[in-house]
Image (tube, rainbow, N blue to C red):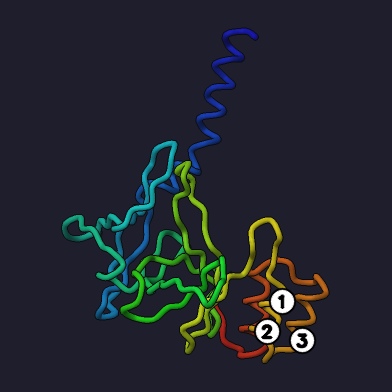
Amino acid sequence: MKIGAIILLTISVIFMDLPSRAQRGYINGYVVTLNDDTIAGKIKDRSSGTFENIYSRIKFKPYKGKKRRFGPDKIKAYAKGEIIYESIWVDTYRQGLQLLPNYRSIAGYGRQQFAKIIYGGYLTYYHLEYADDDLNVDFLPVYKRKDEPVMVRVTQGIFGLKKKLLSEYFNDCPELVKKINSGEFKEPYYIAKFYNQQCFNYGYGP
């Protein structure tokens, strides 16, 4: 390969990687304080290198004032671009001989963390993000109703939707259960959107 082609290829790779790297830098957004005040500024919530590390406390540069750090116990939520993260309590527990843990959100139990809102409303679809052993960001997809502490894990690895569990969870919306079991709805996002819009007429998101 000629030197010129090698240089062009290298430059192309660098520029192709810029959007993903930019998402890990400071991004316009805001924080919502415990007093429900909204403060605009720039947010950084993870490292910018090749390997990602999710910060336990986000870095916040207000447009006026000094740079600060906020953990999930200090603010209610923050937005990074169009993405909103909410501070919630996450606790795991097991019943009987269960191998996989159950999840719940009760103030004072477990720990507080920032959860990414994929679709919100009476039912909120969250991604509970974490860095795996290879320092790649992965997530647990969960549903939570506004007035219930229980959080239901939506998928089980490569096996896809947990149809039996979701059928029980959405037994108040038979039409949705049919769509889940028939395979019409394969993506958790559309399940949450349908449930909020058709069953409660209360939802927000793209």
Q: Compare marks 3 and 1 and give the one earlier in the sequence.
A: 1
Image height check: is 8 above or below 149? above
In percent of width and height, residue 124 lies at 53, 77
Q: Residue furthest front?
A: 97
Examine the rendering and report whether any part of residue 205 can be seen: no
The part of the image, by quadrant, that contains residue 205 is bottom right
In percent of width and height, residue 199 lies at 66, 89
- Is 9 on the left or on the right of 194, as rendered? left
Circles 1 and 2 in contact, beta carbons < 8 Å: yes
Residue at the spot of label 1: 164
The residue at 47%/59% (across/down) is 129
In percent of width and height, residue 145 lies at 52, 84
Q: CA distance from mark 3 to mark 2?
A: 13 Å
Mark 1: which secondary structure? helix
Mark 2: which secondary structure? helix
The residue at 46%/73% (across/down) is 93
Residue at the spot of label 2: 168
Front-most of 67 and 148?
148
Q: Quadrant of the N terminus?
A: top right
Residue at the spot of label 3: 175
Q: CA distance from mark 3 to mark 1?
A: 15 Å
Image height check: is 52 above or below 190? above
